[in-house]
Image: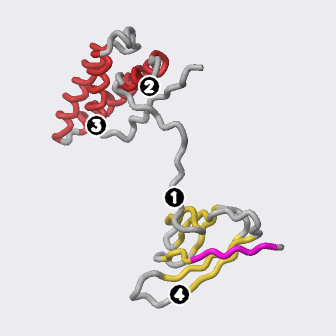
Amino acid sequence: MAEVLKALLGFSKFSPGELRDFAFGTYQRMKDNSSLYTRPPVPMEQLLAQIETVSAWTAAALDGGRAAFAERDKQLKELRRMLVQNGHYVENCAPDRVAFLLSGYQLAPEGRTQAPPVNEAIRNLDWGENSGSFRFRFMAVEEADSYELRWAVSCRTARLANGKQNLSRRRRHTSRSAASLQARSISFKSAR
């Protein structure tokens, strides 16, 4: 069975310069390997013209004019659309990884990677929606019926304030307490 190759097509986080450079790289590499990529949905000349248009509007937007920014963003959106179309074409035409990489596109990761936990008890910790609150997810423990979170103020100049909160088996919680809190430990209680 043939290997399924997916292109990394998330261009929304690219700056205008990064997108232009990436697009020009794919243009050059697909044109150099025209025997592999004979009929892309967006012809190479049209892609090059769009890259030059984006470059011109990016330069025009440096003066800070609203109309130039709006037109630059419109042209960037069109360039992204073209790159996605050609990316899907490369996914379908490339016979193997080497040919795929010759197009200038990058392979999408095969699996999801999870961020490492904060410590052995807390998966992640973040500020809450309201001032003075925080959100967290704790590591699941099979035999735990409830969890208990303890915290203390981490600022040296502030008075020591301790807190304790009993939590259910739900894994995502929000706590309303002092703004500069640091989770210290979570203890697990089991009914057994």
User: Which residue reaches farthest right?
Assistant: 192
The answer to which of 25 and 33 lies nearer the viewer is 33
- Residue matched to label 4: 161
* Of the two numbered discs 1 and 4 in the rendering, the one whose residue sits closer to the viewer: 1
- Answer whether labels 3 and 4 touch (C-beta < 8 Å): no
Task: Give the mark, 3 or 4, whose residue is nearer the N terminus.
Answer: 3
Whole-angstrom CA distance, mark 2 to mark 1, is 29 Å
- Residue matched to label 2: 97
On the picture, is 162 further left or further right than 84? right
Q: Which mark is residue 116?
A: 1
Residue 172 falls in image quadrant: bottom right
Q: Which mark is residue 18?
A: 3
Question: Residue 161: image x %, image y %?
Answer: 53, 87
Residue at figure coordinates x 54%, y 62% from the top left:
117
What is the crowding at mark 2: few (fewer than 14 residues within 10 Å), some, or many (at least 20)? some
Task: Give the mark, 2 or 1, whose residue is nearer the N terminus.
Answer: 2
Task: Give the mark, 3 or 1, whose residue is nearer the N terminus.
Answer: 3
- Answer whether labels 2 and 4 touch (C-beta < 8 Å): no
